């Protein structure tokens, strides 16, 4: 007789455990459209730069828009705390690894300045770019109206885990349906990894959800608190919620897989799992234009009591154009991400990203190693 079962565990899958099955019809990659939309804005590529200070500065946000996507600026980051954030970046990137957490905690203890929020937003808008900004739930009601008044086009409400039913000691916490009524721009919310949580968030009237808890290269949430769901399974669940909500209401909510994406193959698998776009952090921290000088660190790293991130040295691997469009000088799939997506769409006969959502996927734990005896996997 077997022992009684306390709880049943379900299997969940990450990028390296699944594969996309080629379609029965193929198309030329040049015929594939990579457009995606949020609200009234349409972008050429389904790629978003994460709201990490080592990745998105006002200048990088402008460059990202020019490249076809957009970047999200952290409204609680260095750019809104210091008139000269680049000297602070220099201090962070030059600190010894053993001391960097305390340095991060120190520099992120500076007050967020409302005047600098407006300056950053206007700097992005002056370049002609769409401006998206990120805030944590506890500061959304205070900071987001300032950003919108300055011209912000999107508000991204982001924390490690976000739900529509957060219990707190606050008399009246953040209610997304109310936020959506007085913030007259699209609101994206993250992060979540389950069908139920994402569906409840969608029912508040938001315009997009970010998927992912702990998969980022600079994030240690999975180690520190043991939370997370591998990205393929998480994206599949949130995409299923989007389809259910669309069937009920006719409103299509954008699903963005956030974190853990390193290669063109990961990007393709995210879209095939149901994502409308992906959010990248560390891959863009490796761009020559990134403000982190070859380093990256997680947004939760400066937490005063429980840091959930680490500064990592990622190096500078190429320009933003190299990473997105090539030409590539490497064979590991980390450059020309958009080219890889177009080729993958062609192999599946997908004219649009929604077509790629329909591609068959299989569980394939040996997909990266089968027959690759002479290749090195680091």
Image (cartoon, rainbow, N blue to C red):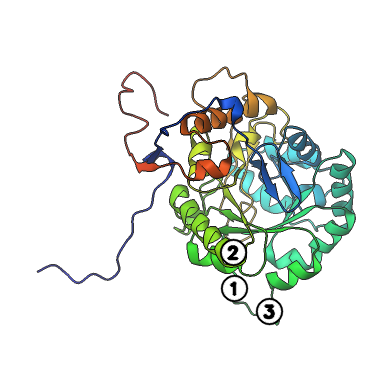
- Locate residue 6 relative to residue 192 in the image: left or right: left
The residue lying at 42 percent from left, 34 percent from top is: 23
Residue 49 sits in quarter: top right
Crowd around label 1: few <14 · some 14–19 · many ≥20 (10 Å): few
| Residue 108 on image: x %, y % | 72, 53
Marks 1/3: CA–CA distance: 10 Å
The residue lying at 89 percent from left, 49 percent from top is: 119
Q: How many marks?
A: 3
Residue 163 sits in quarter: bottom right
Marks 3/2: CA–CA distance: 16 Å
- Locate residue 133 relative to residue 32 in the image: left or right: right
| Residue 34 on image: x %, y % | 63, 36
The residue lying at 57 percent from left, 45 percent from top is: 310
Mark 2 touches mark 1? (CB < 8 Å): yes
| Residue 156 on image: x %, y % | 70, 56
Query: Which element carries disc 1, helix, strand or loop?
Result: loop
Crowd around label 3: few <14 · some 14–19 · many ≥20 (10 Å): few
Q: In which quarter of the image is the C terminus?
A: top left
Query: Which element carries disc 2, helix, strand or loop?
Result: loop
Outermost residue to the front: 25
In front of the other: 337 or 82: 337
Mark 2 — residue? Answer: 162
């Amino acid at each position: 007789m077997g022992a009684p079962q306390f709880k049943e565990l379900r299997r969940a899958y990450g990028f390296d455990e699944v594969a996309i099955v080629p379609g029965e019809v193929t198309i030329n990659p040049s015929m594939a459209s990579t457009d995606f939309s949020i609200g009234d804005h349409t972008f050429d590529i389904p790629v978003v730069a994460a709201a990490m200070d080592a990745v998105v500065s006002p200048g990088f946000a402008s460059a990202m828009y020019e490249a076809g996507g957009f970047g999200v600026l952290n409204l609680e980051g260095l750019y809104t705390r210091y008139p000269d954030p680049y000297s602070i970046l220099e201090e962070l990137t030059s600190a010894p690894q053993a001391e960097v957490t305390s340095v991060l905690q120190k520099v992120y203890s500076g007050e967020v300045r409302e005047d600098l929020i407006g300056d950053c937003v206007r700097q992005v808008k002056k370049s002609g770019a769409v401006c998206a900004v990120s805030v944590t739930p506890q500061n959304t009601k205070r900071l987001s109206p300032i950003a919108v008044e300055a011209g912000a086009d999107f508000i991204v409400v982001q924390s490690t885990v976000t739900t529509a039913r957060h219990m707190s000691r606050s008399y009246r916490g953040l209610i997304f349906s109310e936020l959506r009524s007085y913030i007259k721009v699209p609101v994206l919310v993250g992060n979540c990894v389950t069908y139920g949580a994402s569906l409840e968030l969608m029912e508040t009237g938001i315009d997009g959800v970010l998927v992912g808890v702990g998969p980022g290269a600079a994030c240690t949430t999975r180690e520190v608190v043991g939370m997370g769901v591998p990205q393929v399974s998480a994206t599949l669940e949130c995409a299923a919620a989007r389809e259910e909500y669309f069937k009920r209401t006719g409103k299509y909510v954008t699903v963005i897989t956030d974190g853990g994406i390193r290669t063109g193959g990961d990007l393709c698998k995210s879209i095939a799992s149901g994502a409308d776009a992906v959010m990248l952090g560390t891959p863009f921290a490796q761009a020559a234009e990134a403000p982190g000088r070859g380093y990256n660190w997680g947004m939760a790293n400066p937490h005063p009591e429980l840091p959930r991130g680490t500064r990592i040295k990622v190096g500078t691997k190429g320009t933003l154009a190299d990473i997105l469009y090539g030409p590539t000088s490497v064979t590991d799939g980390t450059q020309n991400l958009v080219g890889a997506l177009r080729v993958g769409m062609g192999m599946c006969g997908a004219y649009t990203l929604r077509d790629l959502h329909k591609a068959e996927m299989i569980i394939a734990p040996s997909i990266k190693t089968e027959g690759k005896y002479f290749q090195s996997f680091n």
